[in-house]
Amino acid sequence: METIVDVDPASGEVLARITAATGAEVGAAVARARAAAPGWSDVPFDARAELLLRSAARLAERTEELAQLVTREMGKPLEQARREVGSRAAEIQSAVDTARRALAVEDLSAAGHTSHVVRDPLGVVAAITPWNFPVAMPTALLLPALLMGNTVVFKPSEHVPLVGASLRELLGAHLPEGVLELVQGAGATGAALVEADVDMIGFVGSRETGLRVMAAAARGLKRLVLELGGKDPLVVFADADLEAAADVAVTHALRNSGQVCCSVERVYVAAAVRERFERLVLERARSWRLGNGFDPEARLGPLVSAEQRRKVHDQVERARADGARLLLGGELVEGPGWFYPATVLTDVPAHTPLANEETFGPVVSIASFSGDEDEAVALANRTRFGLGANVFTRDAERGLRVARRIRCGQVGVNRYLAAAPQAPWVGARQSGLGSLGGVEGFRQFSVPKTISLAR
């Protein structure tokens, strides 16, 4: 029988040993969700919303407890964990408002009849979520699925099983039996859930796992929403506000120890201002102190696992061997835990894995370009991913032109790419399928039905 060994990444201490769900147990959880689906879909929307809003109050009351659990299980600095938990508690009302708009009936008229476009729930949704934002990412799937009238079987990452169990307990406290089921486990459990009798799969994780999920879902024509990896560029033109661009480069390459799908993973700076930009980046990166997430002075916690740290360090070492210059960090930290320091490299060659594969670590990777707009766009698009991008220039028209030409789901111009809460979050190209958030994202957890009435 498979067991999850839940480890504190800052110390290596075993926090818990949890028995993973077997295939039969996954099937039983799905069967309970299936049995509960008709009753839940018949619950009026306002009643469904009220039940989840009551859960929001409990989540807000237990923010500190859950934030500390996030820090213990995946290493995130406590203040960042508090913000993650607190923001999700506050945003449940926003999710209710978005779902209400997504479910609004559309009336259409034609000669001799009137058509009403309504939306039905899909049935049972499998929600498989990652460890890097162990509260924010699950709620991005669970809330739209539940509010749109589906039941859910939820599998959190094996790196954060205690956070996942707490979240299920908080969100499910007022829900009818079977509406929100929890299964724990690693890859085998996730595979069993994908193969089970579900109608839709919402998955957030790596591209490689997403490809396997998509292939398995195809056998049952199951609906999919996939939010996968990224290799987001930051383009800095010679006329840019270099201070602001350096702030974004460092903050969004290093936050959460770089373990963010939309981290700044490639910086392209115009050659004419490269040296000054590098100095500004180094000034900022040096202030990111490494330490246990419970240390109030620490801005960088550990990476989630020894495997993740090895992957990051291998990319850094390979880049150096290929000709990149190391300006800061890049050395394994001795002692317990899986710490990796803020690292800055420049002259990173285009062919090296650091420039092409998702890093998911605290690394600022810099290369220069001539300053030409076409070259900048070509470099930004030199990836199979298409999650996000950032562009800095004082020429507003050029900023918009470049943003439109970069093939990705969201772009920030003279700011980080984060958008208004009502906007959809899109993984273009091989960064995903479908979208999360916004009316369009919520509607993906339903199917439209047209009812036409004679007049």
Image (cartoon, rainbow, N blue to C red):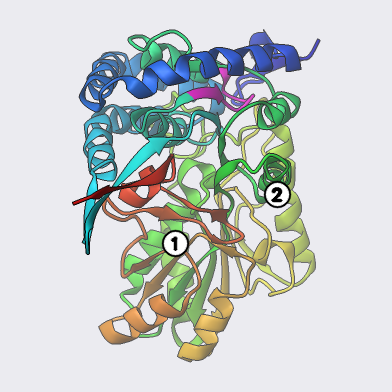
Percent position of residue 317, x then y: 75, 57
Q: Is residue 160 above or below residue 216?
A: above
> In this view of the protein, which residue sits in the foreground, 127 or 305?
127
> In this view of the protein, which residue sits in the foreground, 282 or 442?
442
Tell me which residue sits at (74%, 42%) in the image.
310
Tell me which residue sits at (56%, 54%) in the image.
432
* Residue type for callout 2: Leu
Compared across the picture, whether 245 is left or right of 188 comes to left
> In this view of the protein, which residue sits in the foreground, 65 or 426?
426
Q: Earlier in the sequence, mark 1 or mark 2?
A: 2
The residue that disc 1 covers is: 249
Q: Describe the element under mark 2 as helix, strand or loop.
A: helix
Q: Range of the magenta residues?
A: 152-161
Q: Is residue 252 above or below residue 119?
A: below
Q: Rate crowding at label 1 as few (under 14), some (14 to 19) or many (20 or more) other CA atoms within 10 Å.
A: many
- Tally of marks: 2
Q: Is residue 62 above or below residue 250?
A: above
Does residue 395 appear in this view? no
Percent position of residue 453, x then y: 26, 47
Q: Rate crowding at label 2 as few (under 14), some (14 to 19) or many (20 or more) other CA atoms within 10 Å.
A: some
Residue 400, picture quadrant: bottom left
Contact flag, marks 1 and 2 (Cβ < 8 Å):
no
Q: Which mark is residue 211?
A: 2
Q: Quadrant of the N terminus?
A: top right
